[in-house]
Image (cartoon, rainbow, N blue to C red):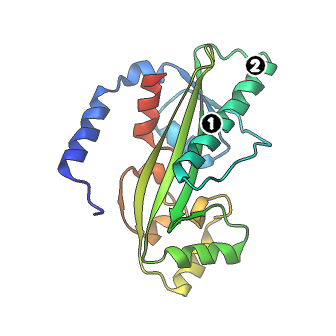
Amino acid sequence: MLILEEEEKTKRLNGCRDINFEDNISRRIILASGSPRRKKILEKLRIDFDVIKPSGVVEKLYKNPRKTVIYNSGIKAQFVYNHAIMNSSNYRNCVIAGFDTIVYFNGRNLGKPGGIEQAFNFLQTLSGKIHRVITGVSMIDFETGSIVSGCETTIVKFRNLSSRQIADYLSVEDVFDKAGAYDISGYGAMLVEKINGCFYNVAGLPVYRFFELLKEI
């Protein structure tokens, strides 16, 4: 079902109540990502953060999509941690946060499209179908080097899309840096019929999971 059961809703809401937001946000976040969508979400949360974009990171693709996103988010966070250590950066009391998001459908990982034709094929494949958006989150405590990881899954159902609607969408939004070739926080919202789970996860930063991992670290 695409509607959360009441018990699950209550569980998640109670989990949010348990979060001590003041303690979590008091630690400066180093965002190990160049994603403007993740940056915008942290800005909405009014979190004090810096951005260091990991470069030259070799991502891996496993059969298990959760293993994929946890591994890739971890190596991004580790790259920034190593970069800060080598450059003697003063990041005391900081937490480095890495993320990785994939669109998973029918055993396939629909990553960032390599061109307009592939982007069109991705959206045509997802038209009228249910897929999963899975985001891995990895955090490193800069002072201790300890790391915690987790992932979040959101179920998304697309509307039935005509070829004209897909072409019109691709003409107005840059999708080449977006898994699955769409951005739910932009014009891509018009492609979606309904979701089950965290909206912000589909944009690349699952807020609930983010704060839960901050509690752990």
| 86 to the left or right of 152 | right
Indicate left or right for 11 with 158 as reference: left
Q: Which of these two is toward me, 169 or 209?
A: 209
Tell me which corner region of the image, top left, top right, bottom left or bottom right, holds residue 177: bottom right
| Mark 2 crowd level (few <14, some 14–19, many ≥20, 10 Å Cα) | few
C-alpha distance separating marks 2 and 1: 16 Å
In the rendered image, residue 210, in percent from the top left (x then y), is placed at 46, 35
- Quick one: label 1, few (<14), some, or many (20+) residues within 10 Å? many
Pick the front one: 212 or 21:
212
Give me the disc on residue 74.
1
Q: Residue at x 55, y 26 (%)?
A: 48
Q: Is mark 1 on a helix, strand or loop?
A: helix
Give yes or no for contact between labels 2 and 1 (Cβ–Cβ under 8 Å).
no
Task: Name the residue carrying label 2.
Answer: 85
Residue 4 rendering spot, x and y as whole percentages: 26, 54
Looking at the image, the residue that sits furthest to the left is 6
Question: Disc 2 vs disc 1: which is toward the camera?
Answer: 1
Name above or below for residue 139 compared with residue 131.
Answer: above
* Secondary structure beneath label 2: helix
Q: Which of marks 2 and 1 is nearer the N terminus?
A: 1
- Splitting the image into 4 quarters, where does residue 111 fall? bottom right
Residue kind at label 2, given as amino acid type: Ile
Query: Compared with residue 120, is residue 41 higher up or lower down, i.e. above or below?
Result: above
Where 204 sits versus 156, above or below? above
Labels in figure, total = 2
Q: In which quarter of the image is residue 174?
A: bottom right
Residue sitting at x 19%, y 46%: 7
Q: Which quarter of the figure is the N terminus placed in? A: bottom left
Residue 27 position within the rendered picture, expressed as x and y whole percent measured from the top left: 52, 20
Q: Which residue is drawn at 54% across and 43% down?
A: 136
Residue type at tag 1: Gly
